[in-house]
Image: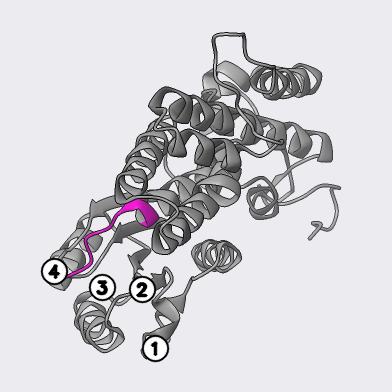
């Protein structure tokens, strides 16, 4: 929405359009002198459209691995050129002694091809190239997640062996952790504790969600897998979490998961939400005003936006 009086957008609107938290915008204003909004008579910030576009480019540069101090001082034209050049360079054809980043234009098929050939070097090269080309969020939604699903299907049908499934998971985990480590540990909203309940040993889905949250200017806190409900609640209090995200696999027992989730919900601080995601989340019969089903990326976007709206109110 537009503010009345001075033309421009409020800080909450800018945050929603760029994915940059309100607190981060204020920190950048003090530390770097940008953005430099106008002020209404009452003191509230008003941002021009040109500054919003520049902030969107800054957010794109951060997704490509740059740090705020490296890019905030750049002009809109310089940012546009930097983002375009970085993405273009990542798509350049490899040399004769380097593995191809795509097969028929698809990094997913290139990964599967490398897996079938047990070519670890090619596999890691494709993943690194795709991470730069796509950026963290699209890497998760367009490659990592579809790849994990496809590898599982091929393993179940006998077209890939268990070693291929393990190699794909390990390589994805390595790349996801590299992406996650590139984000500055600044103030971000919401803070989300990520884990699984007892009996759930897998963490790859959690790592994907962590990178997606970080790319959406949120603050993931990974606990790992197989965590008792009371320990999850203690972590939520320690981190002052806005939400706890639980990954539920398709093979999880929905009745047991519901019981553990109820224990967790009763132990959580009253202001902390419980988000259920993963292939088995929709089978968990747990209805409560603080429980959200976030089985899709769009549902996760909605959950993030709802927390920010509540905090900004």
Query: Which residue appears at 71% of the width and 36% of the height?
Result: 104
Left or right of 253? Residue 1 is: right
Q: Which residue is mark 4?
A: 228
x, y percentage for residue 137?
56, 45
Query: Which residue appears at 35% of the width and 35% of the height?
Result: 174
Q: Which residue is mark 3?
A: 269
Q: Which residue is mark 2?
A: 274
The answer to whether any part of residue 26 appears in the image is: no
Distance, label 1 to label 2, CA atoms, is 9 Å
- In this view of the protein, which residue sits in the foreground, 110 or 170? 110
**Between disc 2 and disc 4, whose residue precedes?**
4
**Label 3 residue SS:** loop
**Marks 1,2: beta carbons within 8 A:** yes
In the image, which disc is placed on residue 288?
Answer: 1
x, y percentage for residue 180?
41, 37
In the image, which disc is placed on residue 54?
Answer: none
**Label 2 residue SS:** strand
**Between disc 1 and disc 2, whose residue precedes?**
2
Of discs 2 and 4, which sits in the foreground? 4
Of discs 1 and 4, which sits in the foreground? 4
x, y percentage for residue 169?
36, 45
**Between disc 2 and disc 3, whose residue precedes?**
3
When the figure is inspected, residue 178 is found, relative to residue 14, above or below; the finding is above
Neighbour tally class for label 2: few under 14, some 14-19, many 20 plus, Cα within 10 Å = many
When the figure is inspected, residue 270 is found, relative to residue 223, above or below; the finding is below
**Between disc 1 and disc 4, whose residue precedes?**
4
Residue 49 magenta-highlighted: no
**Label 1 residue SS:** loop
């Amino acid at each position: 929405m537009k503010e009345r009086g001075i033309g421009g957008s409020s800080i909450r609107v800018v945050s929603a359009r760029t994915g940059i938290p309100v607190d981060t915008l204020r920190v950048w204003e003090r530390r770097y002198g940008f953005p430099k909004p106008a002020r209404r008579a009452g003191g509230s910030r008003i941002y021009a459209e040109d500054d919003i576009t520049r902030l969107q480019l800054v957010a794109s540069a951060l997704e490509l691995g740059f740090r705020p101090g490296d890019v905030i001082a750049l002009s809109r034209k310089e940012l546009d050129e930097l983002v375009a050049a970085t993405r273009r360079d990542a798509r350049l054809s490899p040399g004769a002694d380097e593995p191809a980043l795509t097969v028929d234009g698809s990094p997913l098929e290139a990964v599967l091809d490398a897996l079938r050939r047990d070519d670890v070097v090619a596999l890691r090269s494709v993943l690194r190239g795709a991470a730069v080309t796509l950026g963290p969020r699209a890497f998760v939604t367009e490659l990592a997640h579809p790849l994990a699903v496809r590898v599982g299907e091929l393993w179940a049908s006998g077209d890939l062996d268990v070693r291929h499934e393990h190699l794909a998971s390990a390589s994805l985990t390595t790349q996801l952790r590299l992406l996650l480590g590139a984000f500055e540990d600044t103030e971000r909203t919401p803070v989300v504790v990520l884990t699984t309940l007892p009996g759930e040993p897998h963490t790859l889905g959690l790592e994907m969600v962590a990178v997606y949250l970080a790319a959406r200017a949120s603050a993931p806190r990974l606990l790992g897998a197989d965590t008792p409900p009371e320990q999850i609640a203690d972590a939520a209090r320690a981190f002052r979490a806005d939400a706890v995200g639980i990954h539920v696999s398709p093979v999880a027992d929905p009745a047991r998961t519901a019981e553990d989730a109820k224990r967790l919900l009763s132990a959580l601080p009253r202001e902390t939400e419980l988000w259920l995601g993963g292939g088995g989340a929709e089978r968990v019969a747990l209805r409560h005003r603080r429980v959200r089903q976030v089985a899709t990326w769009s549902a996760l976007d909605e959950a993030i936006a709802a927390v920010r709206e509540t905090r900004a109110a």
